Amino acid sequence: MIEDKNQLRTPLSELGEFGLIDHLTNQFEIKHKSTVKGIGDDAAVLNIEEDRIVVTTDMLVEGVHFDLSYVPLKHLGYKAVVVNLSDVYAMNAAATQITVSIAVSNRFPLEALEELYSGIALASKIYNIDVIGGDTTSSTSGLLISVTAIGQVKPDDEVYRSGAKPNDLLVVTGDLGGAYMGLQILEREKEVFKVNPNNQPDLDAYTYIMERQLKPEARKDIVKLLKDLDVKPTAMIDVSDGLSSEILHICKASHVGCDLYEDKIPLDPQVISTCEEFDIDSTTVALNGGEDYELLMTISQEDFPKIKANPNLSVIGYITEESSGAHLVTRAETKIPLQAQGWKSFNN
Ligand code: ADP
Ligand code: MG
């Protein structure tokens, strides 16, 4: 008989704190020689040798960053890891270790945390990272998950937001706006999910964008691609809050301006058709949607021949002097100032 995991409810109190930690973490194997000591002592121990160490943290809070009425816990675990790895890759670094901290209310049974950790384990496997520690505590309401990612980079290979120079090309990976439109679909279907969580509505026309929202991937492949192409971006950032806001971060940190060309922004056909269905402008979605976890970078003109044939990289504009400002050049060839309308958790 196949057991339905959702039907099993083992209260967390049955295991106790240490039993719970052990139960959730005994599946993790150490893969990197830089991990000297992983889970099981007061602290993990790393031996990174001559590389530089990159550290980043992101926290996801129920009701602020995710809604469990349509986000499966396995996907949440996966996404919590991926959003952190994305920040490591945006430094042009290799991600090697993570720690995972959770605060959880007693409305969650053990089986829910097993689902969460199966997503964490899957991401760790796919991205080849060691889970080396964390913390487990109770919460009076809801679920909170905080991941810290650690990465390595050769000295001088790291790429900051601050290195963009006038005339550099503005380049983005993949396509934009999918995660936001996926969220629109999920919000629309939320009532259906709420009434019957086991009901699977027909969402075939939206599979790509829903996956972009629920199971985003971080662009580990791009760090390798850039190395293979022998291209070191002058600046780089991951697209978590929307293209517009990320471009402005680079402009501000680098003291430059930019011209972004509307007709060059890469969009998936499913984003375009769903935008039409919702009567939303696809450029607005790409600029302000966020959560795409693509990489936005600036590249010296000299490197253009190396990247121009690559289907993963789209040139979407170029860097200008700071005094010119940051603009969107529309299809009608009018210039409008770029604005940071990125998603802000404090506006909720
Ligand atoms: P301490 O009380 O010394 O902080 P804990 O009992 O909290 O230690 O943790 C024991 C071990 O389990 C440590 O290695 C810690 O990093 C790890 N750990 C605790 N909670 C988690 C978790 N949610 N995910 C992964 N590792 C965890
Ligand atoms: Mg602890």
Image (cartoon, rainbow, N blue to C red):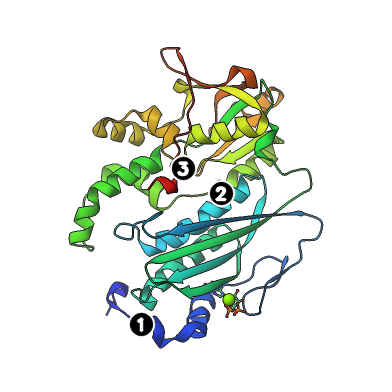
Alpha carbon of mark 1 to alpha carbon of mark 2: how far? 34 Å
* Quadrant placement of the N terminus: bottom left
The mark nearer the N terminus, 1 or 2, is 1
Q: From where the camera sits, is residue 203 visible?
A: no
Amino acid type, label 2: Ser
Q: Position of residue 105 (x, y in %)?
A: 39, 73
Label 2 sits on residue: 86
Q: Position of residue 214 (x, y in %)?
A: 39, 52
The mark nearer the N terminus, 3 or 2, is 2
The disc label shown at residue 11, or none: 1
Q: Nearer the viewer, residue 323 or 67?
A: 323
Q: Position of residue 262 (x, y in %)?
A: 45, 22
Label 3 sits on residue: 292
Q: Nearer the viewer, residue 13 or 120?
A: 13
Q: In the rendered view, would you say 78 is above or below 37?
A: above
Alpha carbon of mark 3 to alpha carbon of mark 2: how far? 10 Å
Amino acid type, label 3: Asp
Amino acid type, label 1: Pro
The mark nearer the N terminus, 3 or 1, is 1
Alpha carbon of mark 3 to alpha carbon of mark 1: how far? 36 Å
Q: Quadrant of ligand 1?
A: bottom right
Q: Nearer the viewer, mark 3 or mark 1?
A: 1
Q: Is residue 3 left or right of residue 151?
A: left
Instruction: Assess disc 2: are there few (<14), some (14-19) or many (≥20) residues with their C-alpha within 10 Å of its C-alpha.
Output: many
Residue at 49% in and 34% down: 243
